Image: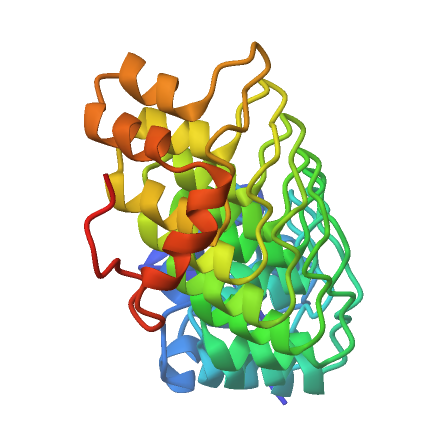
């Protein structure tokens, strides 16, 4: 076993006072070396005392950076020389395990598991290994971390679970792994949003499909009273609205501005979107908070054809016309006007 510390880097001789500064500037370069012999040439015999305090400007040590680069040979070298800092924390209170997860290398993560790294840990932002894995969008990593015993429903300082993070970043693989592992689909973040609402608001169709397939509730509003369908309609997102309606999204409900999804669709000007809402049961005469129906909203925003369509559909007529839609495509066999 070699007892080591960094003493010279790039042929620069270091005095005791200069040691930390000189080596810190080169930690990132050293962390990419793949040949243990090449690494060993930068090491001189001494105690480990100075070596273990070397940090970059963010407080990361060589173990953090080797983990980030997925540098297995270097990590094995550190293990063999008993200088792997498994539990060392940087300025954000993050251990090297977090960097191993960020590397996207499952083998690197397994190294830290084998060396006894704790997975029951949170950093200064309240984020756990599950939150970090949610950011990577690597299915193998997300599945491994999700099944290792990490609390999947732990919330960070923003009140987000790992699922919120994955959805916010549109990381489909992470969403698939977390959902399959049993994360709470309906947890509400500090801002009052479910993961489904975040995804619908951003138009992430595939993620919404996964969440709904795993039983996410489409009728949980945020702090403004908006449900996922409100956002889909405000965005003029016909496909998203169809998907939500097919999974039981409430149609005749107000947000805090006392607007229904149909009012928002009428304002956005999507004719096919409005047709879809009417087909799924939106009430054409359901008023907003001041008694205005969606047809008037459409006319007021210059969407004459939409206004005519909504005005022509009474509840009685709707029940007759619904049967004239093709069951597979939801497209009318006749023109509604």
Of the 4 image quadrants, the one containing the C terminus is top left
Of the 4 image quadrants, the one containing the N terminus is bottom right
Residue found at x 39% / y 63%: 323
Residue found at x 77% / y 56%: 154
- Say above or below: 132 vs 241: below
- Residue 137 visible in rendering: no
Along the horizontal axis of the image, is 111 left or right of 150? left
Of 287 and 124, which appears nearest the observer? 287
Residue found at x 48% / y 83%: 72
Residue 302 in which image quadrant: top left
- Say above or below: 112 vs 256: below
Q: How is the image coloured?
A: rainbow
**What is the tally of numbered marks visible in this picture?**
0
- Say above or below: 25 vs 230: below
Of 149 and 263, which appears nearest the observer? 263
Residue 282 at x, y percent in the picture: 49, 42
Residue 212 at x, y percent in the picture: 56, 65
Of 24 and 106, which appears nearest the observer? 106
Residue 303 at x, y percent in the picture: 23, 24
Residue found at x 56% / y 71%: 213
Along the horizontal axis of the image, is 261 left or right of 249? left
- Residue 107 visible in rendering: yes
Residue 142 in which image quadrant: bottom right
């Amino acid at each position: 076993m070699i007892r080591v510390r960094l003493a010279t880097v790039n042929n620069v001789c270091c005095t005791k006072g200069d040691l930390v500064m000189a080596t810190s500037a080169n930690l990132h370069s050293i962390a990419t070396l793949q040949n243990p012999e090449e690494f060993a040439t930068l090491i001189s015999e001494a105690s480990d005392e100075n070596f273990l305090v070397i940090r970059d400007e963010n407080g990361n040590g060589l173990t953090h950076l080797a983990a980030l680069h997925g540098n297995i040979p270097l990590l094995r070298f550190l293990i063999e020389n008993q200088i792997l800092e498994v539990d060392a924390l940087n300025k954000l209170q993050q251990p090297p395990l977090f960097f191993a997860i960020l590397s996207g290398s499952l083998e690197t993560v397994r190294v830290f598991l084998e060396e006894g790294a704790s997975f029951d840990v949170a950093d200064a932002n309240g984020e756990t290994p599950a939150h970090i894995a949610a950011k990577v969008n690597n299915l193998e990593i997300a599945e491994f971390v999700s099944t290792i015993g990490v609390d999947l429903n732990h919330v960070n300082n923003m009140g987000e679970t790992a699922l919120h993070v994955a959805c916010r970043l549109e990381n489909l693989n992470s969403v698939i792994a977390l959902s399959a592992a049993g994360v709470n689909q309906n947890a509400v973040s500090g801002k009052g949003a479910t993961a489904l609402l975040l995804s619908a608001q951003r138009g992430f169709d595939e993620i919404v499909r996964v969440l709904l397939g795993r039983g996410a509730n489409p009728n949980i509003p945020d702090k403004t009273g908006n449900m996922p369908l409100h956002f889909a309609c405000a965005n003029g997102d016909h496909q998203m609205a169809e998907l939500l309606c097919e999974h039981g999204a409430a149609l005749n409900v107000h947000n805090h501005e006392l607007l229904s999804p149909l009012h928002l669709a009428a304002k956005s000007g999507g004719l096919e979107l409005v047709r879809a809402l009417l087909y799924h049961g939106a009430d054409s005469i359901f008023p907003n908070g001041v008694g205005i129906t969606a047809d008037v909203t459409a006319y007021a925003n210059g969407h004459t054809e939409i206004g005519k369509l909504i005005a022509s559909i009474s509840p009685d007529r709707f029940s007759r016309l619904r049967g004239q839609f093709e069951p597979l495509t939801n497209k009318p066999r006749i023109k509604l006007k």
